[in-house]
Image (cartoon, rainbow, N blue to C red):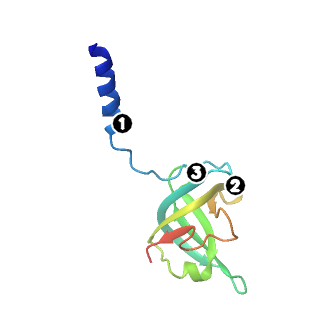
């Protein structure tokens, strides 16, 4: 009779444990997984005119220690080198440049507020 009570107590203790904190993405490189990546902005490179995009390069978790995302220039202007960035999207490997990239779930570019945030 004590055994079922012990099992119930053990299950209650397991269920009462606090959940683990959220982790950064894993850079699955499978074109399907949506990940959230956090890092520090390394560089911001606006495309030459008449193009309306900019590339933001930032640090990511291993193995994607160098990541980039394409954003509208107006959004890139609100971020700065050394600032923190959090981006949610589809992670892929950029083999040509030996880097990783994060792209939006929809639309053409990662957009501030929808796909990523930066601390000014």
Q: Residue 61 at x, y = what percent?
A: 50, 53
**Residue at 55 percent of width and 74 percent of height:** 112
Disc number lying in front (1 or 2): 1
Q: Does residue 48 lie above or below 21 as drawn?
A: below
Mark 2 or 3, nearer chain start: 3
Disc number lying in front (3 or 1): 1
Q: Does residue 89 lie above or below 79 as drawn?
A: above
Q: How many tags in the picture?
A: 3
Q: Which residue is mark 2?
A: 95
Task: Report helix, strand or loop for mark 3.
Answer: loop
**Residue reaching furthest bottom?**
49
Q: Mark 1 and mark 2 in contact? Answer it, CB < 8 Å.
A: no
Q: Does residue 95 lie above or below 79 as drawn?
A: above
Q: Quarter-wise, where is residue 66 in the image?
A: bottom right
**Residue at 67 percent of width and 48 percent of height:** 30
Q: Quarter-wise, where is residue 5 in the image?
A: top left
Which quarter of the rendering shows the N terminus? top left
- Looking at the rendered structure, which numbered label has been put on residue 27? 3
Task: Report helix, strand or loop for mark 2.
Answer: helix
Seen in the image, is 30 located left or right of residue 9? Answer: right
Mark 1 or 2, nearer chain start: 1
């Amino acid at each position: 009779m004590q055994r079922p009570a012990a099992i119930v107590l053990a299950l209650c203790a397991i269920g009462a444990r606090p959940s683990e904190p959220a982790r950064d993405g894993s850079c699955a490189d499978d074109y399907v997984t949506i990940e959230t990546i956090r890092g520090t902005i390394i560089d911001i490179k606006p495309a030459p005119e008449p193009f309306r995009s900019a590339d933001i390069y930032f640090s990511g978790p291993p193995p994607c220690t160098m990541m980039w995302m394409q954003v509208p220039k107006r959004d890139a202007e609100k971020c700065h080198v050394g600032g923190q960035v959090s981006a949610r999207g589809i992670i892929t490997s950029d083999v040509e440049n030996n880097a990783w990239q994060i792209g939006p779930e929809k639309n053409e570019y990662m957009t501030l507020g929808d796909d990523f945030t930066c601390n000014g």
